[in-house]
Structure formats: structure tokens, C-alpha cells
Amino acid sequence: MADITKEYLALRDQYIESRFARLNPVQRQAVFATEGPLLILAGAGSGKTTVLVNRIANIIRFGSAHGSTELPRPVTEADLNDLRNAVAAGRDLPRETAYLAVRPARPWNVLAITFTNKAAGELKERLRAMLGDTLGGDVNASTFHSACVRMLRRDAERIGFPKSFTIYDSDDQQRVIKQIYKDLMIDDKFLPVKSAIGQISSFKDKLLSAEDVAGEPFANTKAQLVSKIYTAYAGRLKAAGAMDFDDLIFHTVKLLQNDAEAREYYQNRFRYVVVDEYQDTSIAQFHLGAAAGGRHQQRLRRWRR
């Protein structure tokens, strides 16, 4: 490797590190890890969201440049002098992406998932502050359910639902279940409605359809009854062109797992899937992140301890 290239690479790392100088060494390690899956375990108040925001900024500004020997173009003496001066003066390098970045992601190629709409809004505001209104505003930041709604509004017809499907809230869900109880003459005292709803929700989180449940041996009478309720409930939602909140993730995962064309579309669109406050107990959430991201995507999964 030529001396000019060696010096340029060292200065490039120095330049990039200076843009994240407020982070501690462990936080910077996470920010600069851009290839392959990444899991961060951290306690409350340790700067988890700060790492997430800075990491997305690094992915968009510099890609995998830090620590790499790859260059976007051959180095010239003029390039080296420009970088020397920028590092010495502590100023931004004009057209830094063209000079420095290695496979940077477009903002819309990043899917950042948070737990609440408020958190998603705050994340986008912090990204705008770091990257500017255009780049920061184009990052896809939303909750699991909001991300799924957007996918299903585009592709719901592939799984037999209208694109204009209705989203049932908990009151709608209870109304339908209670009508099923009435039609099947089920005693709420024997099997409370809340218990049946909770069990159906658990099935969906495990990605078990009504058909899957009905095809398994039943442990007892209640289990068989829950299966009948689930089958009737799923059928009525399908007939009404409706989904409940659990369905939003359930059907999105099934779409991505079973429809190669839809899966390829989203895996090409989202190079990086970043999850804030990841819940390791949710099977459906795990499979959603795995199915939505492409081969080169990055998942940052984090939870409180």
C-alpha cells in the first residue's frame, strides 16, 4: 500500500472519530460496527438511544469506512491535503461522502423501529439535528405496528385482505369474541373472554395460525374450545377485511416469509433494520426483523436490564 494511501486511511479514521468524539469508547465501538448483526445490552440511562442515533448517522454519512482499507476512489495529493487541513482545523470536509464514505446507506434504506410513536418522533428530530432536515427526515422511523401497517397497505391483497383493511382495537376484538361466545353457546365462567383473547394473542406471537392450532392435539377441553374460538375469530376478521393489533405483525411476518416477491422488495429497500428496546420474548418481532432485512442488513437489538 502506498504511503499516501496509508496516511489518508489513518486521517480518514481520525476525521470520522472526531465526528463522534462525545461518545465513550464502547459507544463508538457500536457506532462503527456496520457489518453483520449486532446486539447491545445496556442499562437505563447508559445512552442507548444516543448510540442508535449516532450509529444511523454514521451509516448514512460514512457507511463502513471507519477501520476499512476500501476507498471510494484513488487518493490524490489534493485529496490528502484537503483531509489534512480538515482534520487539523476540526472542520467538515466538503463533499465528505464522495471523499470518504464506503457503501453508505441512503436514509430510506434504514428502518428504525422504536416502541412508541413519541420515541419515533424524537428519534427523527435527533437525526434531523445531526444530518439536516432532508437526510434525517427521510429515515423510516416508526413503531413495529406502524411499520407493519405501511407494508400491509401496499401488499395486503397478496394475503387475501383489502389494502384498505380495518384495524380493530381491543373493544372491537371483545365485541367479535363475545358474539362468537354467544353463537357457540360458550359459558364465560368456564372460559373467560379475556383468557381466550390472551391465548389467541399468544398464538399469534408464536406465529401459529388458527389452522396450525386446530391441527395439534388438545391438552384439554378448554384448549379445544380456544381453538374453535380462534378459528371463528380469524374467519370473521377475514370476512370483514379487518385485522387486530396482533395481526399486523403476524400477517406481515407471514407475508415476508411466504411471498418471495414481497420479501425481495423489502430486503432490497431496507439494508439496515435497527430496533430500539427490542423485546427478546417476542417471537413475532424477532422474525419480523429477520424477514424484513436483506442479506447485508444490520439489526441493532437492545433491551433494558
Image (cartoon, rainbow, N blue to C red):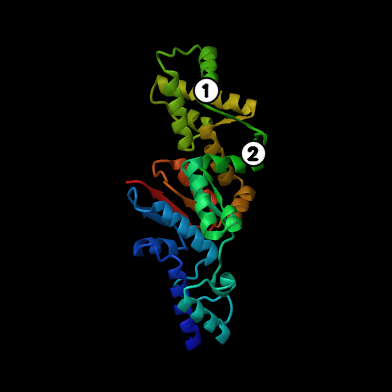
> Label 2: how many residues lie within 10 Å, few (<14), some (14-19) or many (20+)?
many
Image-quadrant location for residue 168: top right
Examine the rendering and report whether any part of residue 2 can be seen. Answer: no
In the depicted structure, whether residue 185 falls above or below residue 243: above
Residue 132 in the image, given as x and y percentages of width and height = 57, 58
Disc ID at residue 156: 2
Which sits in the foreground, 255 or 61? 61
As shown in the figure, which amino acid type bears the numbered disc 1? Asp
Residue 300 in the image, given as x and y percentages of width and height = 44, 54
Examine the rendering and report whether any part of residue 4 can be seen. Answer: yes
- Quick one: label 2 or label 1, which is nearer the N terminus? 2
Residue 216 in the image, given as x and y percentages of width and height = 45, 31
Q: Is residue 215 left or right of residue 150?
A: left
Instruction: Name the outermost residue toward the front.
Output: 89
> Label 1: how many residues lie within 10 Å, few (<14), some (14-19) or many (20+)?
few
In the depicted structure, whether residue 169 falls above or below residue 276: above
Residue at coordinates 48% horizontally, 34% vertically from top-left? Answer: 204
As shown in the figure, which amino acid type bears the numbered disc 2? Ala
Residue at coordinates 42% horizontally, 46% vertically from top-left? Answer: 278
Q: Tag 1's secondary structure?
A: helix
User: Residue at label 1?
Assistant: 171
Q: Is residue 21 left or right of residue 233?
A: left
Which sits in the foreground, 9 or 134? 134
Residue at coordinates 61% horizontally, 46% vertically from top-left? Answer: 259
How far apart are the alpha carbons under marks 2 and 1?
A: 23 Å
Q: Tag 2's secondary structure?
A: helix
In the depicted structure, whether residue 176 falls above or below residue 243: above
In this rendering, the label closer to the viewer, 2 or 1:
1
Which sits in the foreground, 144 or 177? 144
Disc ID at residue 277: none
Residue 208 in the image, given as x and y percentages of width and height = 49, 35
